[in-house]
Image: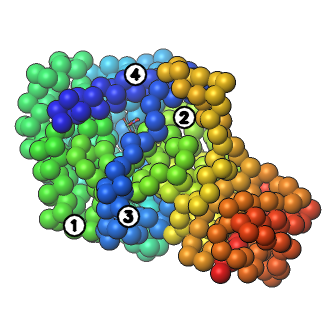
Amino acid sequence: MATLLIGVTVAIALRFKAAGQQQNQQAASPPRPAITMASPEDAAREMNNPRSKWFREAKYGLFIHWGLYAIPAGTWKGQQIPGIGEWIMNRAKVPVKEYEQLAAQFNPVKFNAEEWAQLAQDAGMKYLTITSKHHDGFALFKSQVSKYNIVDATPFKRDPLKELQAACAKRGIKLCFYYSQAQDWHEPNGAGNTWDFGPDDKKDFDQYLRDKALPQTREILTQYGPLGMIWFDTPRLMTEQRAEQFTKMVRELQPDCLVNGRLGGKGDYRSTGDNRIPDQVVPGVWEVPATINDTWGYKSYDNNWKPPSEIVFKLVDIVSKGGNYLLNVGPTAEGVIPQPSVDVLRKVGQWLNVNGEAIYGAGASPFGQEFGKLDETKKDQRGQPVFEQAKEWRATTKPGRLYIHIFTWPKEFTLDGVKGKVTKAYLLADPKRKGLKYSQTDGKLVMQLPDKAPSELASVIRLDLK
Ligand code: JFZ
């Protein structure tokens, strides 16, 4: 077990190294699979866990990385710092004494919890996961444990998580908190800050857990009503025993609250690597944490917004493989979610308004051929054949129903391997539910489609089966 943990830690550490070279990372083939597979028993346990029912049905959530790093926004002392924005303290090796001073400038007067929650709702997202404390150690909530928090250390003096609690509750959006349990660059004994405090293996990590991470976890579990989950991250120095202290606390204080897969022990579900989507259906409960541009925390010069078509494709792709999509935006230091990301989210929300029944509560594809195939003539760095992704269509399911999401619109659509007899076929975009012409022999279904695709994002055909 110990070797396994070390292995995982090393793998994650290597990945951090790569974070600054994301461009290169993407060009080369991925060095590791997108997700660790669960045993069939574990996958079944995840799927049958009543606690995760809402999560399995929700499918789509809003991730928000917000904190002091939104002030430098990717630039430190006139230098653009490569890598993800919320890592600026680490990447620029900013001493605590200097970084701390950002707190006195943090005054996000344009922050409006109602607007953020409304955006999540308009976007069709069912949960909202926000950084209550990221690796920089700054708490975005009122804390008795550490003065380094938004109420005590900033001119703003408000608790945005309290405001979000009310705004989310009003709209039935599950509120979830990201909490960096291991890395805390503000604390002498927290993991990660080697430039101020020396190597991690010389630290009294348990002291940090006892005096900050655990008591703050208690605060977020007791001061904000029922939470959908706590999203722990980067389990450096975490052992199973250390993880157990957190799990025990969550279970005692909020038995319905989920624990994600990055605590350091077994969680209620698993995460893929950031921005990584598996090639095939993955059994069990899992989530893809991904961001709408190339940073999590706001960077003033990252304008690489993914278009709505890409977000819809990724959402459908992930759901058709059995997962959830947690999509991130990074608000500015004023408390504003950048308009381009708002526009994208709302577009996707409009698509979901029409096609949501094929996403929420939907199961994975019963097929597989639509995902693409291995190209034996192309090899990655490890000498493995490269997976060539196909993007013409995807499938999701509900009992007695099949949904075909079409991205490349043909005249005629042929589907092999349909189990059951199709009794009706129609486009979700058609309010009249006019039946499409089709013929079915054995498992082969041939459908005649209208000349023009009803949606430029993805047109969904619902098939009712007997
Ligand atoms: C972590 C954080 O360090 C980062 O700042 C951000 O919050 C992100 C959502 O999570 O980064 C990771 C964690 C795990 C992997 C990659 C990046 N991973 O397992 O591939």
SS class, disc 2 = loop
Q: Amino acid at mark 2?
A: Asp
On residue 254, the disc is: 1
Residue 345 in the image: x percent, y percent? 61, 55
Q: Amino acid at mark 1?
A: Gln
Gap between marks 2 and 1 measured at Cα = 34 Å
- Mark 4, residues whose alpha carbon is within 10 Å: few (<14), some, or many (≥20)? few
User: If you read the primary sequence from the N terminus, does the residue marked by circle 3 or circle 2 appear first?
Assistant: 3
On residue 47, the disc is: 3
User: Are discs 1 and 3 less than 8 Å apart at CB?
Assistant: no
Quarter-of-image position of residue 241: top left
Front position among marks 4 and 2: 4
| Residue 368 seen in render | yes
Please name whichever residue, 285 or 131, is drawn nearer the observer in this view of the structure: 285
SS class, disc 4 = helix
Q: Amino acid at mark 4?
A: Lys
